[in-house]
Amino acid sequence: MDRVNELAKSKAAVIFTKSSDCMCHSIKSLFHELGASPAVYEIDRDPRGREVELALQRLGCKPTVPAIFIGGMFVGSAKDVLAAHLTGSLKEMLIAAKAIWL
């Protein structure tokens, strides 16, 4: 759990992904389209990835990826981020965390 918290606070926007997951790719693309450069951790390519995946499960991530953190806080999974994007709150969160500037 400490590793996830440490990584989640390493940058304004952090996405835990798996390299072959299409929703992970979509969320990364959305962040880039909004002008953010998130830290991306592909847990299937990390030697300690299983440990990270279990920690994400303990946080309530189901499915475990993509798991999105903004400003060090857990935002949720793809559906949560897409819902926030549709309401405009995703961009507001990214601005508040200084992940993007206007």
Image (cartoon, grey):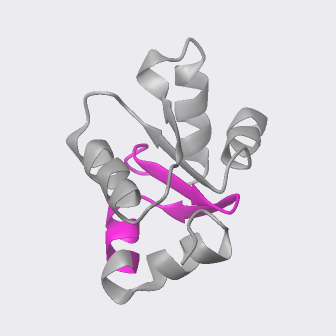
Question: How many numbered marks, from 0 up?
Answer: 0
Q: Is residue 26 left or right of residue 31?
A: left
Which quarter of the picture shows residue 95? bottom right
Position of residue 3 measured from the top left corner of the image (x, y, whole percent): 73, 33
Q: Position of residue 11 (x, y in %)?
A: 68, 49
Q: Name which residue lies at 56% across and 70% down.
A: 94
Residue 28 within the segment the image draws in magenta: no
- Which residue is at the far front? 102
- Which residue is at the front of the view, 43 or 70? 70
Q: In the displayed orientation, state which residue is furthest to the top.
A: 47
- From the viewer's perspective, tell me whether residue 68 is left or right of residue 72: left
At x 33% / y 28%, what residue is drawn? Answer: 19
Left-right relation of 13 to 18: right
Query: Residue 5, position in %: x, y?
Result: 73, 45
Please say if 30 is above or below 15.
below
Specify the quadrant of the image occupied by residue 87: bottom left
Residue extending furthest toward the bottom = 87
Residue at point 26% right, 51% down?
Answer: 26
Image position of 95 with respect to 72: above or below: below
Q: Is residue 26 above or below residue 74?
A: above
The range drawn in magenta is 62-84
The residue lying toward the viewer, choosing from 73 and 31, is 31
> Which quadrant is the C terminus positioned in?
bottom right
Q: Which percent across, then down, holds residue 90?
A: 46, 75
Q: Is residue 70 magenta?
A: yes
Please identify the quadrant where the N terminus is shown.
Answer: top right
49 above or below 95? above
